[in-house]
Image: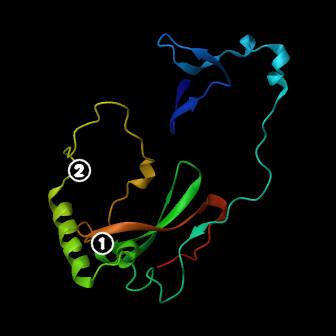
Amino acid sequence: MRQTETKDGPLVTLPEYYRLATNANKKVEWIPVRAEEVPAEAGLAEIRFSRPAGQRPEPYVTPDAPESCWKQPGPVAGPFQTALGDGSVVTYYWYRFADQPAMLNADLTPAEREVAQARVEKLHRNWTKDRDYLPPPAIGKLAELDPALIVTPPPGLEVGYVPIVTRQAAKDTLTVKDSG
């Protein structure tokens, strides 16, 4: 594996060829090999993988019916958009935590949703982003998030509100018909 720094962040190039080998612990594993080490009789040098033919996937869009949980009670701010590293664009809205579609469909009573709302507001007020709340992992490596997914709430929505994505599509298939 080779890592190259680019203006958009690190780019990782994976090896093209591997072979099955037994490591020092007598465990079988795939190890990378250079192209010149691949036997010619394997015929792998002539194989090409082209991009799949076909249309781009349809955009992911939430339900648009006026009576849906995406509209009733609905978002309090938006739409907003952000471009992701994979070339797609997400559209999102800000919902009151207890009024987001997932909470409305969680089989909770209105009173139970309000208890959850109060707890989230307490978290938002007291858990600042400059502190660690869980110990770092003892093994492994933390996953990385696309920086575009870290969004800032509009003024006044810092406590008790959450961003909810309502659409994801390739950049060149955007239309302004979003839920919300």
Element type at marker 2? loop
* Residue hosting label 2: 129
Relative vertical location of residue 169 with respect to residue 74 in this rendering, above or below? above
Measuring 62% from the left and 72% from the top, which residue is drawn there?
A: 175
Residue type at mark 2?
Lys
From the viewer's perspective, tell me whether residue 107 is left or right of residue 114. right
Q: Residue at x 79, y 13 (%)?
A: 39
Mark 1 surroundings within 10 Å by alpha-carbon count, few (fewer than 14), some (14 through 19), many (20 or more): many
Quarter of the image holding residue 55?
A: bottom right
Residue 74 falls left or right of residue 112: right
Q: Quadrant of the N terminus?
A: top right
Q: Specify whether residue 79 is in view.
A: yes
Query: What residue did someone put label 1 on?
Result: 97
Disc 1 vs disc 2: Cβ atoms closer than 8 Å? no
Give how far across and how far down residue 158 sits, in percent.
Answer: 25, 66
User: Considering depth in this image, is 2 or 78 the residue closer to the camera?
Assistant: 2
